[in-house]
Amino acid sequence: MLSFKMLRTLTIKTNKKQEIIDITEKVKSIVSESRIKEGFCIIFTPHSTAGIIINENYDKNLCYDILDKLEEFIPVYENYRHNKIDNNAHAHIKASLIGPTKTAIIKNGQLLLGTWQGIALAEFDGPRVRNIFIKIIKEKIE
């Protein structure tokens, strides 16, 4: 059964055309502020050219590897039909593969992440100002 819900917004200014920005500590701070011991943390970005990643955040080179591999599969400069509108089809495709939402478990007041895992915003059409909504849902224990 679920009860208490809290919604917060993070606003992130991206600086590059494509980049991955670690937001783990900001999300952890929101979880801590909620004082929820058991529940769920939903991380959502309402943008069709950005996504949310949960993956290793210890080695920053992994971010470059992810971006490089996505670029190899979905190059920026390609003859996409959507580019006739606003020249960012590659960003829409990449964001579709990454996805706009991730959910993490809250256990004992902490995000339940793996040893090396972190949460990041993946920007594919920057620089821009991006919003990320953090929804904390308390699990009601009976």
Image (spheres, rainbow, N blue to C red):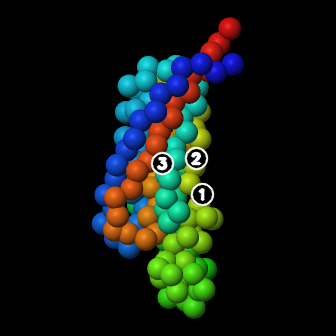
Q: Which mark is residue 99?
A: 1
Please tell me in which quadrant of the rendered image residue 90 appears: bottom right
- The three-letter amino acid code for the residue at tag 1 is Gly
Q: Say whether residue 71 is visible.
A: no
What distance separates the C-alpha of mark 1 from that of mark 2?
8 Å
Q: Nearer the viewer, residue 85 or 137?
A: 85
Residue drawn where x is 40% and y is 41% of the image: 9
Mark 3–mark 2 distance (CA, rounded to whole Å):
9 Å
- Viewer-closest of 70 and 60: 70
Q: Circles 1 and 2: CB distance less than 8 Å? A: yes
For residue 134, say whether it is visible: yes
- Which residue is labeled 3 in the image? 119
- Label 1 residue SS: loop
Label at residue 135: none
* Element assignment for label 2: strand
Residue at far bottom of view: 79
- Disc 2 target residue: 102
Q: Where residue 122 appears, x then y in whole percent? A: 47, 61
Q: Is residue 58 above or below residue 85?
A: above
Q: Position of residue 32 (x, y in %)?
A: 41, 26
Q: Nearer the viewer, residue 122 or 1?
A: 1
Q: What kind of residue is marked 2?
A: Lys
Residue drawn where x is 54% and y is 78% of the image: 89
